[in-house]
Amino acid sequence: MRRLVLASLVLTSTAFAGTITGVFQGTVVQLNTHKPAAKTRWMYVQGKNGVIRRANIAKATFDYDEDFPKAKRHKKAEDSLLNSAVVRVTAEQDVAHNGEWQATSVSIVAPPGYVKPAGKPSTYTPTLAKR
């Protein structure tokens, strides 16, 4: 019985010591565009509440949101990643390394200055992140 309790404590503590997955959306306020092959490539995203989050996008995958205008798309979604673009970032917050956000995917929601046509409802449905 004591071994079972000890084993469950060890497993529980290691599960929480790893990473936390989160999703945040906002406007790109600063983008590190040089050194595309570098280990770190920082993007700063400002949410509607004014909070700015920094995420390393070096290992992220890039895609377009369904609402992104087809006429403004590039062959590679990453080419549409510019300052003032609206993005949705899925990232892991590495608790063991200062809590830095490491982006796993970046979805480009809207290009800089784009105003969504009135009457078209959003197709985005928030979901819980999977571990």
Image: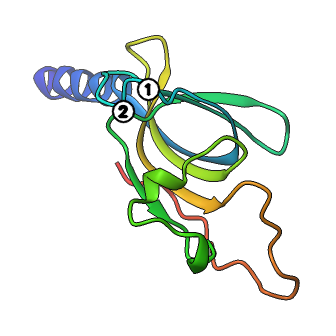
Screen quadrant of the N terminus: top left
**Residue drawn where x is 19% and y is 20% of the image:** 6
Q: Would you call the spot at circle 2 few (<14 residues within 10 Å), some (14-19), or many (20 or more)?
A: some
**Residue drawn where x is 39% and y is 54% of the image:** 130
Label disc, if present, on residue 22 of the rendered structure: none
Tell me if residue 39 comes above or below residue 51 in the rendering: above
Disc 1 secondary structure class: loop
**Residue drawn where x is 55% and y is 69% of the image:** 65
Q: Give the x, y percent position of residue 41.
A: 43, 26
Residue marked by disc 2: 58
Whether tag 2 and tag 1 are in contact, CB under 8 A, the answer is yes
Closer-to-camera residue (25/74) = 74
Q: How many marks?
A: 2
Q: Measure the alpha-carbon separation of dots 2 and 1.
A: 5 Å
Is 39 positioned to the left or the right of 128 in the image?
left
**Quarter of the image where one finds residue 27:** top right
Q: Give the x, y percent position of residue 100.
A: 49, 21
Label disc, if present, on residue 41 of the rendered structure: 1
Q: Give the x, y percent position of residue 115.
A: 83, 68
Name the amino acid, label 1: Arg
Closer-to-camera residue (7/31) = 31
Q: Give the x, y percent position of residue 129.
A: 46, 54
